Image (tube, rainbow, N blue to C red):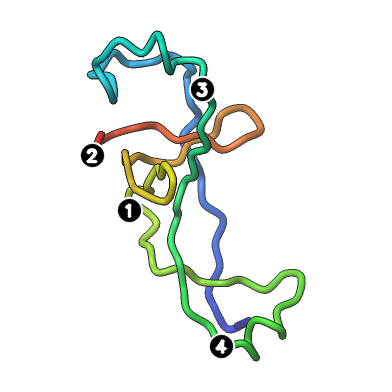
Amino acid sequence: MSDLSVATIELDESDGLAVEGTPLVERNLSMLGHVKVRVDVHLGSTEISVQELFSLSRGDVVSLDTDLDAPVSLLLEGKPIARGQLVAAGDCFGLKITEIL
């Protein structure tokens, strides 16, 4: 796995300002608005053998099946609900939503 060409990527810095758009759900959520849910961001995936998996070490790169400029998916309970692009949000990653599914 060490024969990959690896380069650092630059992420856009989030300005922290929300752009007005259509909410994901346009309903009265007074009964459910306080309920916490877990969302995940899916960057991509790959398939490797068990031997390759167990031979991974610090510094190795696992190549994913997603292009650098491809949108990433926001998942709720494993189901995609939106797509967007990764941004830098301070010292963390963020997701700038570009499409609601």
Q: Are marks 1 and 2 in contact (CB under 8 Å)?
A: no
| Precedes in sequence: disc 1 or disc 3 | 3
| Precedes in sequence: disc 3 or disc 2 | 3
The numbered disc on residue 101 is 2
The residue that appears at 40% across and 42% down in the rendered structure is 74
| Precedes in sequence: disc 1 or disc 4 | 4
Instruction: Name the quadrant containing residue 50.
Output: bottom right
SS under mark 4: loop
Between marks 4 and 3, how big is the CA–CA gap? Answer: 40 Å
The residue that appears at 32% across and 53% down in the rendered structure is 70
Residue 100 image point, x, y percent: 25, 34
Q: How many residues crowd around disc 4 within 10 Å: few (fewer than 14), some, or many (20 or more)? A: few
* Residue at image mark 1: 70
| Precedes in sequence: disc 4 or disc 3 | 3
Q: Are marks 3 and 2 in contact (CB under 8 Å)?
A: no
Q: Amino acid at mark 1?
A: Ala
* Residue at image mark 3: 35
Q: How many residues crowd around disc 3 within 10 Å: few (fewer than 14), some, or many (20 or more)? A: few
Residue 69 image point, x, y percent: 34, 52
Q: Amino acid at mark 2?
A: Leu
* Residue at image mark 4: 49
